[in-house]
Image: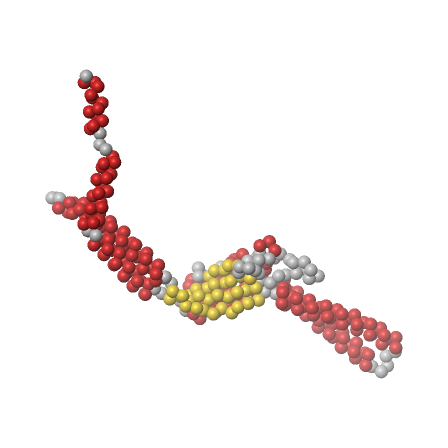
Amino acid sequence: MSTSTEPRTRERDLPDPDAEREVDLGRYWHSLIQRWWLPVAGLIVGAVIGYLVSIGGNQVYTAKTTVYLGQPLSPSSSIQLQSQATNPSTVGQIIHSEAALRVAARAAGMPVAKLRGHVASRPVAGALTKLGQTPLVLITVTSQTPRRAQVAANMLARSVIRQTSTYVSTLIKSLQEQIDGYTKSLDTIDRSLSASGLSSTDKLVASFSRFQIVEQLTTAKQQLAVAKEVELGRQVTFAVATKTTARSRRNSVIVAALIGLLIGIAAALLWDPAGRIARRPA
């Protein structure tokens, strides 16, 4: 008989976890209701502190400039060449390089440490070309002084254009030399044709040579125009600094209020345990 009732007695002696959980939750809720002013005070104080912090937040200036990296073409101007000028990631490598940062910082009259970490670049959406690459890239510089941000952004843009346009710059120089040579040849031929002692055969040969040179000169001028307008990189928009707030006032108030609310809730829940510890005799 004793063996049959022993398990039931042991089952009745076991604690009920659900009941204990309900008791704990009820005690916590009672503590929050009894000391409701602590969470409310934490919420209000946190919101006020967040507002004051946002008012005292530092103002920063942002300068943005857009650079066109250019599209190099083959000497026949019929095939697009893939180079560092057609890869937008090249801009990020250049503007974060120590050499470019030092040049920009020196021009802006600021320590390079104030510029390092405050520059960024991203491709301009909608300018996609072959292989997902883009010749338009936005360069952004932030600084506490508008002039420094503006000057640094423009100097970084020039560094990017100079380093990505070496091939096209060489091509433009070569085309310009060809044009100068064709122009001098035309002047020589024109002086020969105006001479009185030139025979009819010589005039015919000179006229034919002049016609060929004029065609070559026209082609060279067209190629030079393409090189300058299409292939050569350039700064599309000049950087102008605009004021921005370092901290969002709305976000600062919300975050600080939430932190204050959580601190107030914790204080309300720990009020009784802390009081018991404090009243405990040493």
Given residues 13 and 237, the one toward you in this image is 13
Question: Quick check: 155 above or below 190?
Answer: above
Q: Quadrant of residue 193?
A: bottom right
Residue 215 left/right relative to 6: right
Q: Which residue is located at x 68 percent, y 70 percent?
A: 176
Q: Which residue is located at x 31 percent, y 59 percent?
A: 253
Residue 97, visible in the rendered structure:
no
Assign the C terminus to one quadrant of the image.
top left
Q: Quadrant of residue 40?
A: bottom left
Residue 20 left/right relative to 219: left
Can you give x and y, in whole percent of width and height, for residue 147 in the image? 44, 71
Q: Quadrant of residue 129?
A: bottom right
Residue 258, visible in the rendered structure:
yes
Can you give x and y, in whole percent of width and height, for residue 167 in the image? 63, 62
Residue 210 left/right relative to 88: right
Q: Which residue is located at x 73 percent, y 70 percent?
A: 218
Can you give x and y, in whole percent of width and height, for residue 49 in the image? 28, 60
Q: Which residue is located at x 25 percent, y 35 percent?
A: 17
